[in-house]
Image (cartoon, rainbow, N blue to C red):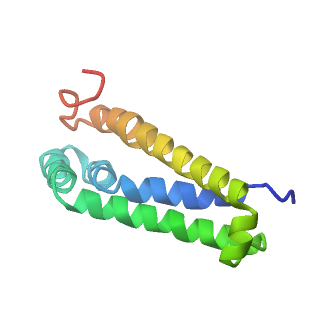
Amino acid sequence: MESNDVSSLAPVIGLSTITASLCCLPSIIWVLFGGSSAIVAANSLSETLYYSPFRYFLYSISFIMLLFGLVIYFRKKGICTLDEVKQNQQRVINTSLAVFTITILSYLVWNFVILEILGIALGLPWEDSAFWN
C-alpha cells in the first residue's frame, strides 16, 4: 500500500456523510416502508429534525467521527506524536483538508440532491423548498 493512500478513509467519509443527513434519511425510509399513508408523518419528522438543534448535533457527531478517523489513519501511518505531526505537517494538513472537503461535498450531493430527489419521487412535499427552486 502506498504511504499516501487515503482510500482507507472512504468508510469514515461515507459514515460521516450519512450521519450528517440523518435529519432527512429517516423520513425517506419511513415512506419506503410505510407507504403513502406515512407521507405526512414522515414530512413532519423531517421538518422537526431539520429545523431543530438536533441537526447541529448530527453535524457535531459527524465532525467528531472525521477527527477520530483521521487520528486513527495517521497513527496507522506512524504519525503518533505531536513532533511527528510537525515533521509531516504538510501531509497532515493536505490529507485533513481533502477529507473535510470530500465529506462536505458528498454531504451536499447526498442530502440536497439525492435524498431531495428521492423524497420528492416518493411523494414528500419537498419540491417547494428544493435548492433548485
**What residue is shown at x 69% (from left), y 60% (from top)?**
89
Q: Spot the residue most to the top.
A: 133
Q: How many numbered marks are there?
A: 0
Q: Is residue 38 left or right of residue 82?
A: left
**Residue 121 position by quadrant:** top left
Q: Is residue 125 above or below residue 11?
A: above
**What residue is shown at x 36% (from left), y 64% (from top)?**
60
Pick the residue in front: 91 or 116.
Answer: 91
Q: Is residue 42 above or below residue 123?
A: below
**What residue is shown at x 22% (from left), y 28% (from top)?**
127
Q: Position of residue 129 (x, y in %)?
A: 20, 31
Q: Spot the residue most to the bottom.
A: 81
- The quadrant in which the C terminus is found is top left
Q: Is residue 41 left or right of residue 121?
A: left
Q: Spot the residue most to the right.
A: 1
Q: Position of residue 124 (x, y in %)?
A: 21, 38
Q: Is residue 125 above or below residue 54?
A: above
Q: Is residue 30 above or below residue 81?
A: above
